[in-house]
Amino acid sequence: MPELPEVETIRSQLAPLVCGRTIERVEILDPRWCMPLSRDELADALTGRRVEALQRRGKYLVWRLDGDLSLVHHLRMSAAILCDPRPEPQHLRVRIVIGGGRGRRRRLTLAIVDQRRFGTAQPVFGEAALESFFERRLGPEPFGTDFTAEHLWRVTRGRKAPIKALLLDQRLVAGIGNIYADEALFRARIHPARPGGRLRRAQCGTLREAILDALQAGIDAKGATIDDLRHLDGARGSFQDRFLVHRRAGEPCPTCGEEIVRTVVGGRATYFCGQCQPPPRGVPVSGAAAVSLRRLRAPDRARRSPPPRASP
DNA sequence: CGTCTATCCTGTGGGC
DNA sequence: TGCCCACAGGATAGAC
C-alpha cells in the first residue's frame, strides 16, 4: 500500500543512488509489469539512458531520463524496490542494473519485487505527454500551493459520495490511500461516511490541515510497512506503529478512549472513533451503519460483522 | 456525469 | 490436518 509517504520515502532514498548514472540493463521477468508493451520494447527504450532526476507525483515514481523520456512507475499494492539484495528475493519481477557513472561508483542492481503483481511501468515521451498523463489522472499535490481549503470545498460541492471515497479519488487530490484517509479523517474529527457535499467550509480547512499532518507524520516515520513494503535496504517503515485509528479496531481511541470501530466505506475497510467522529444526520449511531448496502447481497455474512482484530 | 461494482493478483488466516 | 474462501487494496473499465 505505498501511498504518498511511502513513495516519497523510496524516492528520497533512491534518488542519490541513481541520479546522474546510467541504466545499463533492464531484465523484466514479469511481462505484466510493462503491458501492453513487450518486455523487449520497454527494456530497449530504457537501456543506455542516464537518470536525470527521480521525482514523485501522487503515488507515482517518475524516472526522468535523458532524451526527454520518462518512466512512469507505480508500485500499486505490494511492490518494493531493493538495492543489491542477497540472496535473490522472492517475487522478483524486474532487475535494473545501474552503471558506475562518472565518479566510477560501483555498479548496483535494483530489484523490483511485487507479491501481488499489480505494479506497472510505462514510458512517456516528452514533457507535454507527461503533463497530460498526470492531468487526466491526478488532482493537486497535497503539499503544493493549489491544494487549499477552497479547492477541497469546491470539489466536494454537490457530491453525495462519502468523504472518504472522495479522498481516495486521485483526481480530487493526489497521493492519499486507505491508511492516510482514515488517519486524516480522524485528525479532522470527520466521520468517514459523511457525504462530501455536506462538509462545512470550516471543515474543509480542518481536513486540509489534517491531511497534511497525517502525510507528514507518515513521511517522518519513513512510511508504513504493513506487508511487504520495504526500504531499499529491506528495512521497514515505522508509521504502522503510530496509526491513530487505522487497523486498530477494538483498541481505545487515543483521544477519548472509546473503542475504535471498523466498517466498510467506499468498498474499503475503514477505521474511526464513533465518539470523536460523530455520524452525519440520517446515519444511525452504530458505526456499522456506515457499511455499504451492497453487503446485503450476502445476508449471512453481513450480519456477522467483521471480527475485531485482536492485536497480538 | 456521479456512483457503485468487478477485476487484476497472491499469501494469509479463519472456519469447518 | 487440510480444504475453502474471504480478505487486503490502487486504479480503472463498465454498468446503471
Image (cartoon, coloured by chain):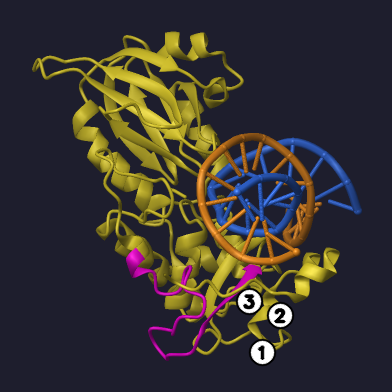
Chain colours: A yellow, B orange, C blue
Q: Which mark is residue A32?
A: none
**Which chain letter goes with mark 3?**
A
Cα–Cα span, label 3 and label 1 = 13 Å
**Which chain letter goes with mark 1?**
A
- As drawn, C13 above or below A1: above
Q: Quadrant of residue A198?
A: bottom right
> Is the residue under label 2 in contact with that under label 1 (CB below 8 Å)?
yes
Q: Quadrant of residue A303?
A: bottom right
Q: Is residue A65 left or right of residue A270?
A: left
Residue A247 in the magenta stretch? The answer is yes
- The amino acid marked with disc number 1 is Val
Disc 2 element: helix
Same chain for the residues under marks 3 and 1 in the image: yes
Nearer to us of marks 3 and 1 is 1
Task: Sort mark 2 into few (<14), some (14-19) or many (20+) by Cα contacts within 10 Å.
Answer: some
For mark 1, what is the residue?
A: A285
For mark 3, what is the residue?
A: A194
Q: Which mark is residue A289?
A: 2
- State the extent of the magenta-drawn residues as a range: A241-264
Disc 1 element: loop
Residue A31 in the magenta stretch? The answer is no
Same chain for the residues under marks 1 and 2 in the image: yes
